[in-house]
Image: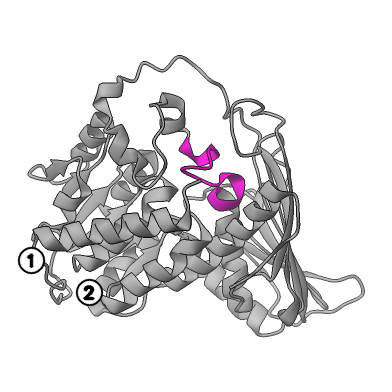
Amino acid sequence: MSSAFDRREFLAAGTAALLAGTSVESARGFKANDTLRVGVIGPGGRARGLMKSLAQVPNVTITAVCDVWDVNLAEGKKLADPRAFTTKAHEELVARADVDAVLIGTPDHLHVPLTVAACAAGKDVYVEKPLTHDLSEGKAVIDAQNQNKRVVQVGTQQRSMPHLAKAREVLKAGTVGTVHKVKCSWNRNANRATRYKDPMDPKSVDWKRFLGPVKDQPFDAYRFRQWRWFWDFGGGLFTDLMVHWIDVVHWFLDLDHPESAASVGDWYSAKDVWETPDTVQTLLRYPDRGVQVHFEGTFSSNRVGAMTEFNGTGGTLYVDRGRYEVIPDRGKKLPPSSLIVGTGERGLDFYDKPDGELVHLTNWVECCRSRAKPNAPAEAGVSAAAAAHLANVALRTGQVAVWKG
């Protein structure tokens, strides 16, 4: 993994080059019926899904697309305005006057450099989670948001789901008592680690630009496609999946970061293929708040799926992306407001109702117009990612990782 110094150099150089090459202005003010012009950086599978949701938001058009791979660039162009500008260089996209805001769907290691560059160019930003790739990046991206007065929305879409906002109210009302223990999971049963002969033409990829601040290394088509499971580009299950639920925990309980983490990880389905483990657990402690949070994730079983339980002194609040439930503790009686909201199978990865991506993107667009703070600003993204990074420090060192500020 590249050092914090190397990453700061990259951020500073990228921003300086951008500002030297263009005269930038703050984004214009918007009226309700003005068209918000969006540029998309990294239209891979995830971002193309977001582009389809964005198309449902009134008065939004995609005017520019950027990707380092010819195939993604062509696929992203299909979902944009027919006249959309295309490029492999993000500097060209963020410098354009016909781009008011930027959606970033790149691998994790590029989230902060691109968000900083976009904010410096006067663009509002929607950036996928995790916001940061290591603990050193938090201040830079928060400063970029605040000093440039930009609207930055991190893609932890649970914060915009109405049933989860209601569940938070239920918790805050003391319905389940005092919460000392939280249980989170994201379990899947899927073979995601099969290596195969990839027909990708290396010449179709700007590999150097893809690497960005990461150390130089030979082109690897598998790492390019499966970047989540390699330390240079992602952070495995903790940053890819736990971040969603730890963000909900921080939001519901008004937490910032854990004071310590103890983690374990093993390779059961991805041995000798992934750098990051395919089966993990971590215990995060927030001693000043009297809270412990446990997360488990695997690709070997989908038991309980993706969910979070807040275990209180009077009962448990269960939440997932489609429902919440209030469950009394043995021998306890809960107030009449206790209920189940939502239908369908427990613990699914995604639900059509609510459409988390659509409501989260809608909140972002509304805030770009009103200049209000979005539901998941940079501060929330840094906080959630920091918990995952601390869990990974514990995992990789085999020791309890302690927060050092």
What residue did someone put label 2 on?
369
What residue is rendered at 30% in x and 47% in y? 52
* Residue 161 can be seen, yes or no: no
Q: Mark 1 and mark 2 in contact (Cβ < 8 Å)? A: no
- Residue 23's disc is 1
What residue is rendered at 29% in x and 61% in y? 12
Magenta-span inclusion, residue 228: yes
What residue is rendered at 21% in x and 61% in y? 16
In the image, 66 versus 5, the foreground residue is 5
Task: Judge whether 269 appears above or below 1 on screen.
Answer: above
Q: CA distance from mark 2 to mark 1?
A: 23 Å
User: Which quadrant of the rendered structure holds the C terminus?
Assistant: bottom right
Residue 46 % position (x, y) = 39, 44
The residue range painted magenta reads: 227-240
What residue is rendered at 30% in x and 42% in y? 43
Is residue 81 left or right of 261 when viewed as pictured? left
Task: Judge whether 40 appears above or below 309 on screen.
Answer: above
Q: Rate crowding at label 2 as few (under 14), some (14 to 19) or many (20 or more) other CA atoms within 10 Å.
A: some
Say whether disc 2 or disc 1 marks the residue closer to the N-terminus: 1
